[in-house]
Image (cartoon, rainbow, N blue to C red):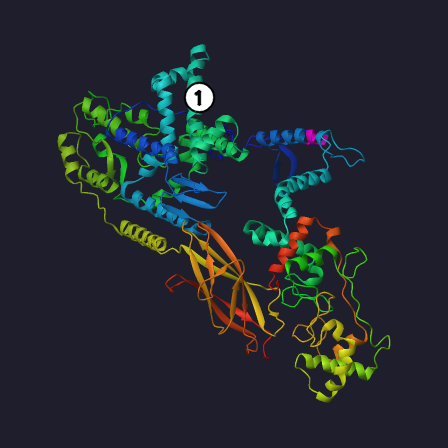
Amino acid sequence: MSHIGTSPAAPPSLYAAHRKVHPRAVNGPVRRFKWAVLMTLLGLYYIVPWLRWDRGPGAPDQAVLVDMGHGRLYFFWIELWPQEVYFLTGILVLAAIGLFAVTSLFGRVWCGFTCPQTVWTDLFMWVERAIQGDRNARIKLDAQPMSGRKAALKGATHAAWLAIAAATGGAWIMYFNDAPTVTLDILTGDATAKVYFFFGLFALTTYVLAGFAREQVCTYMCPWPRFQAAMLDNESLVVSYRGWRGEPRGKLKAEGVGDCVDCGACVHVCPTGIDIRDGQQLECIGCGLCVDACNDVMKKLDRPQGLIAFETLANIAASEAATRGMTPCKARLDAGMAVRHVPKMIRPRTILYSAVLGAVALVMLGAFMLRDMHTLAVLRDRAPLYVTLSDGAIRNAYTLKLANKTREIEGYALVLDGLPGARLVAQSAQADAAGHPLLTTRPDGLTEWRVLVTAPSGAVLPQSMPVTFRLLDGAGRQVLSTSSVFLSPGGRP
Amino acid sequence: MPTKIEKDAITGTDTTGHEWDGLKELNTPLPTWWLYTFYACCVFALVWVVLYPAIPVQGWTGITGWTARGAINGEMETARARTEPMLARLRSATPEQIAANPELRAYAIAGGRAVFANNCAACHGAGGQGARGGYPSLADDEWIWGGDLGAIHRTITHGIRNHDSDEARVSMMPRFGVDGVLTRAQITDVAEQVLALGNRSTDAAMAARGAPLYAENCASCHGERGEGNTDVGAPNLSDRVWLHASDRAGIAAYIANPQMGVMPAFAQRLDPALVNMLAVYVHSLGGGR
């Protein structure tokens, strides 16, 4: 959009037209590390739903499964119930603080290496490059008018993208359904509408976000780049250009110029299409591909590596101060490199993040280790509050709910404290040798009993008295207890 | 409309010609996406009018013939089809068989609770606690017409003292006062004797006068010691559960002019499966024998 030039107060346009980025292939240690991370993460994502884990008969044998229908989350040996969703919250809290800690130490490594947006975009770019050729070939192809060849290349690219997107959506669904079953159902058209919807949703978002939106997701949609600066400081390792060494940039053979030959390699390989030599910027995802590209050029020119490097801003500033006023030469390079110091890993910020991370992790671990495998809850009947029996005795009714998170069938004797002489009857439960109701739990489920408590006839009772239900194991040890009240009209025997 | 369209210098947009204290209103065109969404909504609305009964004219049902009543009937049909296999099993079983089968029992109690709330709770209370004025509690252990599963099932099926079912159980307590069978003083004496049956008498002489009257007029139904008789729906008079007032004046009033309860025959209103479920549920309220 253009603004009217006649007005002197014309504001600058806030709109930036999208420029398509055509990143060039690059090779080097950072790129190899990035490939390794990509393979690992994608491998985990696609393979994990197929891992099996035997939980015995009647239970799903998928190692990682979120079973929405039955309200269970399975993770290898761990089984969580919906009321334990706070463990998930805890993991999210840990992930957030972990992200802060890693960012303060090593910059945006999450963005550059592990973020799904980066991983899938990288994969899509690899497909694009394999089919349409490298940067220059792609720029040329995009500039060409539509032709049979162009249509074939573009078509093949989009087909490959859609196949990956479908696999991505399919794998997502597998985390919520039995993988072999749902795969067969999707292929034979027998899956539910819900499965197809989420399959389509995740396939479509993968296709659009990794195929088209790409770096715009990082620049415009993601909130993380907007506040990541709050985690970074001068001692964080970030992808930086050593301007003190490279400037003034100029032709290879020119006199009085720095090490940067302005070849543009760093710009050409950048997946977000920026120039790292402009300094730290929002769009930089810290992937370090420019480090590889520049090192490649420096190697060819027989100059020291590291014109672009993972370096702290403190070191850059120190080198800059040490070399100020010096003309480009080997002495400037040495002087600049000499004043560098090892990045300070232990700083108030990293101590704080690690402490919080450790504390939350400890609390979560403790909560997990101590989590109750059985819970007992009691609901008093409210209509009627009490029943007067024919012999004048007062009876209260309760519903006991016993959740058993194990896969064992367990029997407990039910006893009542606080009402001496009371008679306990649990409907549809046997009594043990001592006459206590024997509550036998279902494995991996909730069992409930209606329990009738009758105070002895003639007992003088207050209107409300506290009682405690206790469950005893075979050895008579208390396993669980819960309290309630016993109500009666009161005042009369 | 202004004849001369003025362009705004900064945005390049036409103005509407409206001006307030130097502020001019821009005639900014609607965003394209908004406009196309609007057009899409118009098309959607047109299609909707054709397909569905969108015009409030008698007989216009749209070409799909959709009606709200038809939709709910369809949903009810689906729900019935889903519950039918279980209901068929509950229909063919006796209440005793249902109570003995954990699966059927659990279903009967869960479903019976809903059926009870719809059909029984109005008189007998939400938890079967009964209500003043002659609606018996179903949660205690005193039963006027019998408290085992068979008796409960029979009572629900045919009801009590109604005109709907020939098999409804009927018993009439004479109106001893209104019809002049006993004098007022005699009735008071009998009431004292009834208190004595539950060891609550405070006037031994009065109870002694009432005892022969009780033996002559009441014992045939209520029993020599007031133990009651579920075959004729005569309540136990010696225990602590009272359907009506339990003091001497209240008992005397009842003897003079009894008000006996009536219950409909629910077999005529409910599926036999639901009656079976109700019997099992009522039995589980706490008083079942």
Q: Quadrant of the N terminus of chain B?
A: top right
Q: Residue furthest top?
A: A148
Which stretch appears magenta? B45-49
Q: Residue furthest bottom?
A: B205
Estimate the x, y position of residue A53 in percent, counting from the top left.
Answer: 37, 40
Q: Is residue B53 above or below residue B121?
A: above
Estimate the x, y position of residue A397 in percent, counting from the top left.
Answer: 56, 65
**Label 1: how many Cα within 10 Å (few below 14, some 14–19, many 20+):** some
* Residue depicted at x 23% and y 46%: A345
Q: Is residue A459 above or below residue A408?
A: below
Answer yes or no: is residue A169 visible.
Answer: no
Estimate the x, y position of residue A493 in percent, counting from the top left.
Answer: 58, 79
Q: Main secondary structure of the magenta part?
A: helix
- Front residue (pair A221, B271): B271
A60 sits to left or right of A261: right
Residue labelled with disc 1: A158
A170 sits to left or right of A102: right
Task: Say whether residue A440 is magenta.
Answer: no
- Front residue (pair A93, A338): A93
Q: Is residue A270 above or below residue B186?
A: above
Question: Image quadrant of residue B130?
Answer: bottom right
* Kind of residue at badge 1: His
Q: Quadrant of the C terminus of chain B?
A: bottom right
Answer yes or no: is residue A299 visible.
Answer: yes
- Front residue (pair A121, B282): B282
